[in-house]
Amino acid sequence: MPMLPGLPRGSGLTKLTQVQFGGYNHNLYAGDGAIYDTRNMTGDYAPVLSPREPRLLLRELERPNGIFAKDGLMWVDGTDVFYKGASVGTVEDSRKTFAELGAYIVILPDKAYLNILTGEFGSIEASVAASSVLFTNGTLYGVATNANSLTVSSVDFNDYFKAGDAVTISGCTVHSENNKTPIVREISSDGHTMAFYANVFTLNGTVTAPVAYTEPGPVTFERKMPDLEFICSNENRLWGCKGDEIFASKMGDIFNWYVFDGLASDSWTVPVGSEGDFTGCVSYIGYPMFFKDGAIYKVLGTEPQNFETSASFSSGVQPGSGGSLAVSGDMLFYLSRNGVMSYTGSMPTRQYEMFGGVLYTGGVSGSDRRKYYISMLDEGGSPHLFVFDTESGLWFREDETRALGFAYHDGNLYMLCDDGRLWIVGNVMSPPDDIIETERVEWSVEFADFSEQAPEKKGVTKFYMRLEADEDAAVDLWIRYDSVGEWSSVWTTEDRTERQQKRSFTVPIIPRRADHFRLRLTGTGDCKVYGITRELYLGSTLRSLRGRQ
């Protein structure tokens, strides 16, 4: 005897309305109404769903190597350094790290600098070699002084050094003890003689009656900077790190890293002696902060005589993610080996629960003071750009952009991408006049499984959406049943040539029973979704197999 078709067993039609929308929640446990994935959405209007503001394209670089801002925008295109749109110097063709102190912008690894007031571009390091170097008695501040001077008639030392510089001398063979790093106190007006403190050199004769002598050479004179991997500025000093060692420049002086005079203005250095190399540094709440994979170091004190490091052994910056350090909403964010962390001065706090266990690498970040932007690579090497809104506390995934660097200037956040495009992102405060184009935003929201917390099959009969859309904006609704098959389009905006005023739209669909279903909203242009109501009925648990029933 043939069986009759099964009939829905349940309690009639039910309407469930959602008017509060959250952010990115890429977890299997995400329930009814949670947002499993986003593309180009924003928390500006939370809890209302809305796409982000369009980006503004400023220019396109051929070989993007870095971006920075200090009273103007700096970028490096190949070997050319640009500041405020003008070429100011050349460097090696490699990725750059930047810091600023006073009127200076420092560029690593080239150890180059730009004085933004004078336009002077040059090298922090200086070096000159000479033969026939006369080590002699001289004068200092107009007073005769023993064993304190050296003279080279063929060199104008004013072209390389200045008083106060620590100059490393090497190549001495007659008196090898003169290979050292003394501090220049005076340079003669003709530039041929450098004077130091008394008895800094060993001469012929005796200590009480020193006699001048000549080093045949070549003798090399150098002002050196450590080979820093990471750098920042704090309290009128540059700070940096490489390997296991922390360095601080002389106060207010980007050129000197080896001045040890016993003064409060001295340079400073210390090896911390813990496992691993440093992975990043940043200035935060008045302190220079240094990170390893499993440790955070804060330098305390006001001068070299009382500088000390305070360590906490917790999740630090993941190797290769030194560019992920950025301050937003008074919190410091960075990418650790476990995921994104926030830090307020004590212990870091996890911010990675919403990423669903996906481990990201290669973090590069920036901040517009409210939002934290981070570009990361997933386990397959694909890039993703995420944004954390510190006011709403929500994460959003924007798109597949791979950023090389960010810079905040004049109320705008600039993002340099690996394809050479230089964008203004986020909420634009003061757009420049030379914008090339404004993008048209394509967006989407995918909700997690709607199971209605019921084991029965359920049949969806209708949706109601309250939304508004700009002129020429497009909005489409899609549905998928039981995690199989293709997405089915069930609705699209009626008229894309006119602005859709805020109102409810009814979306009737052919009922189909399923254990669960998913919704996806896609669109182009500006739109705001205020609420979604789903009308459904529950079936019987007796017929809970996969498929149409």
Image (cartoon, helix red, strand yellow):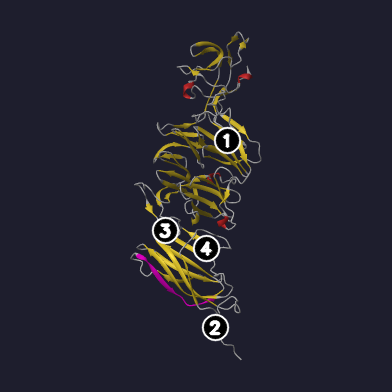
Residue placed under numbered mark 4 in the picture = 34
User: Residue 457: percent from the left, percent from the top?
Assistant: 56, 75
Give neighbour class at mark 4: few <14, some 14-19, many 20+ (Cα, 10 Å): many
Q: Is residue 512 on the magenta stretch?
A: yes
Real-space Cα separation, disc 1 to disc 3, in angstroms: 44 Å
**Above or below 120: residue 162:** above
Query: Counting residues from the N terminus, which is met first, the one under dot 2 or under dot 1?
Result: 2
User: Residue 217: percent from the left, percent from the top?
Assistant: 58, 20
Q: What stretch is highlighted in magenta?
A: 500-513
Residue placed under numbered mark 1 in the picture = 299
Residue 240: assigned label: none
Magenta-colored segment: predominant secondary structure: strand
Real-space Cα separation, disc 3 to disc 4, in angstroms: 23 Å
Query: Counting residues from the N terminus, which is met first, the one under dot 1 or under dot 4?
Result: 4
Residue placed under numbered mark 3 in the picture = 441
Residue 7: assigned label: 2
Q: Is residue 385 left or right of residue 358?
A: left
Of 237 and 375, the residue lying toward us: 237
Real-space Cα separation, disc 2 to disc 3, in angstroms: 45 Å
